[in-house]
């Protein structure tokens, strides 16, 4: 399977060629999420709220797994840039083994502690809690395959090959979109049907990724991972994973606050998040692209190319998110109304889109910065920024809540996103010399 050299060619073209398949994968997932939300939304606000509640713990697992995904992505990209095939293979094998151990462990936790985790959200609705646990129970084994799919996609990107991941993701989304309505309605599984459709799709994707990965990673080569490989993966992945875990944990605590406003509020946030994800299609793709781009170019010792890539990614991100902001500000009720007809849910969701929309350009600064720092092997910087200001969302929300009600939660997210984006851009400028020095060390 094709391996792409990211250290040669026009920076803008290379970056776009790398990012667009990642964006395409996100677009496919976004399309599926919207279609799935239509199907689940027809079951009522309780069904939407139950999936929203279970999703907190699905995201938590993916956040912890980022230790492996991010760490392995950095090390493999740098090894590929240095043309050190043996090191790349060792890192891939170490990541696969660590991924298996974590996936099995997290699945057991969700199956045995799922009821307590859902109960923590304090939704005050037995029906919603029961549906959420059913969805989470099916999602537990699904995550084992999903974790491998996420890891494969990141490793493919480290090798400069994002088109294979796009094709596999496309197949998974199509399978999911076909199975979901069948399992939800004619077969009568309801919310569980949505989870089963995802499980089947992720399983099929796993086998496709595994087959394609055999050729790209050359894991048949008799090279065994060393303890130092595991240490390096965890060392580089831990800061970003800690950031994502904290982000999710704060989201769970904020979700508990949202739950006090009723299931309409939970459903509104769930729908708002799905719509908001249209912004993260591009900036998420840029995040993955710039991480692989800087990793390979760092390994190749191409300093100016690293900085030029960051500047190009920032320009793309700000342009795209500014357009999304205009849409969120001009027609929020219409967007939420596509999924539910409950007036209360529409009002809460519309306010969510208006407030969050203001911060999207700054979120793009943060995410591109995250990819840049990850690629050059300095993940502690974006992790520190995110940890400090993500924690800050809780006191800001509690401080504003007596005056703004549930909108205080949305403002706490928007204000901290703005600050994180500005500080990230500032830190890129401050650490330019340190990055230049790293080029000579790697």
Image: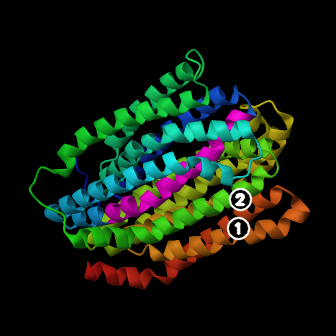
Q: In x, y percent, where is residue 244?
A: 53, 62
Quadrant including the N terminus: top left
Q: Along the line of sight, which residue is nearer the eye, 21 or 262?
A: 262
Quarter of the image where one finds residue 415: bottom right
Residue 91 position (above or below residue 112): below
* Disc 2 versus disc 1: nearer the observer: 2
Q: Residue at x 15, y 50 (%)?
A: 218
Is residue 261 at least partly visible in the picture?
yes
Q: Along the line of sight, which residue is nearer the eye, 290 or 303?
A: 290
Q: Main secondary structure of the magenta part?
A: helix
Residue 318 position (above or below residue 119): below
Residue 243 position (above or below residue 261): below
Q: In x, y percent, where is residue 365?
A: 57, 65
Left or right: 364 in relation to 127: left
Q: Along the line of sight, which residue is nearer the eye, 442 or 310?
A: 442
Magenta segment boundaries in residue numbering: 46-74
Q: Is residue 58 magenta?
A: yes
Q: Whole-Å distance between the Cαs marked 2 and 1?
A: 9 Å
- Residue receiving disc 1: 393
* Label placed on residue 254: 2
Residue 431 position (above or below residue 316): below
Q: Secondary structure at mark 2?
A: helix
Q: Is the Cβ of the residue at disc 2 closer than 8 Å to that at disc 1? A: yes
Give the number of marks: 2
Is residue 376 at least partly visible in the picture?
no
Q: Secondary structure at mark 1?
A: helix
Q: In x, y percent, where is residue 100?
A: 32, 52
């Amino acid at each position: 399977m094709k391996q792409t050299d990211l250290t040669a060619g026009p920076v803008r073209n290379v970056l776009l060629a790398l990012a667009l398949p990642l964006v395409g994968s996100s677009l496919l997932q976004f399309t599926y999420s919207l279609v799935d939300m239509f199907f689940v939304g027809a079951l009522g606000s309780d069904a939407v709220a139950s999936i929203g509640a279970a999703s907190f713990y699905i995201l938590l697992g993916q956040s912890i797994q980022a230790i492996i995904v991010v760490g392995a992505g950095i090390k493999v990209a740098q090894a590929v840039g240095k043309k050190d095939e043996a090191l790349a293979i060792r890192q891939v094998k170490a990541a696969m083994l660590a991924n298996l151990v974590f996936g099995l462990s997290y699945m057991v936790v969700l199956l045995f502690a799922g009821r307590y985790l859902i109960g923590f959200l304090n939704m005050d609705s037995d029906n919603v809690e029961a549906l959420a646990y059913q969805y989470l129970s099916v999602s537990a084994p699904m995550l084992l395959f999903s974790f491998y799919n996420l890891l494969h996609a990141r490793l493919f990107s480290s090798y400069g090959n994002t088109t294979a991941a796009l094709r596999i993701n496309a197949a998974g989304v199509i399978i999911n979109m076909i199975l979901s309505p069948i399992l939800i309605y004619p077969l009568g599984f309801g919310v569980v049907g949505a989870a089963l459709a995802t499980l089947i799709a992720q399983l099929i994707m796993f086998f496709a990724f595994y087959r394609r990965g055999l050729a790209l990673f050359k894991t048949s080569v008799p090279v065994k991972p060393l303890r130092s490989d595991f240490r390096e993966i965890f060392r580089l992945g831990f800061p970003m994973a800690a950031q994502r875990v904290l982000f999710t944990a704060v989201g769970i605590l904020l979700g508990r606050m949202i739950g006090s406003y009723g299931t309409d509020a939970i459903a509104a946030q769930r729908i708002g998040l799905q719509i908001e994800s249209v912004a993260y299609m591009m900036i998420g793709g840029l995040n993955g692209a710039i991480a692989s781009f800087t990793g390979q170019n760092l390994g190749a010792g191409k300093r100016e190319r690293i900085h030029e890539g960051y500047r190009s990614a920032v320009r793309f991100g700000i342009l795209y998110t500014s357009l999304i902001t205009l849409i969120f500000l001009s027609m929020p009720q219409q967007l939420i109304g596509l999924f539910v007809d409950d007036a209360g849910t529409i009002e809460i969701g519309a306010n969510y889109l208006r407030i969050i929309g203001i911060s999207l350009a700054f979120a793009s600064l943060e995410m591109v910065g995250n990819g840049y720092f990850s690629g050059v092997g300095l993940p502690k910087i974006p992790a520190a920024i995110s940890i400090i200001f993500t924690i800050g969302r809780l006191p800001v929300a509690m401080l504003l809540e007596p005056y703004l009600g549930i909108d205080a939660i949305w403002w706490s997210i928007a204000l901290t996103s703005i600050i994180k984006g500005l500080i990230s851009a500032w830190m890129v400028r401050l650490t330019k010399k340190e990055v230049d020095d790293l080029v000579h060390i790697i």
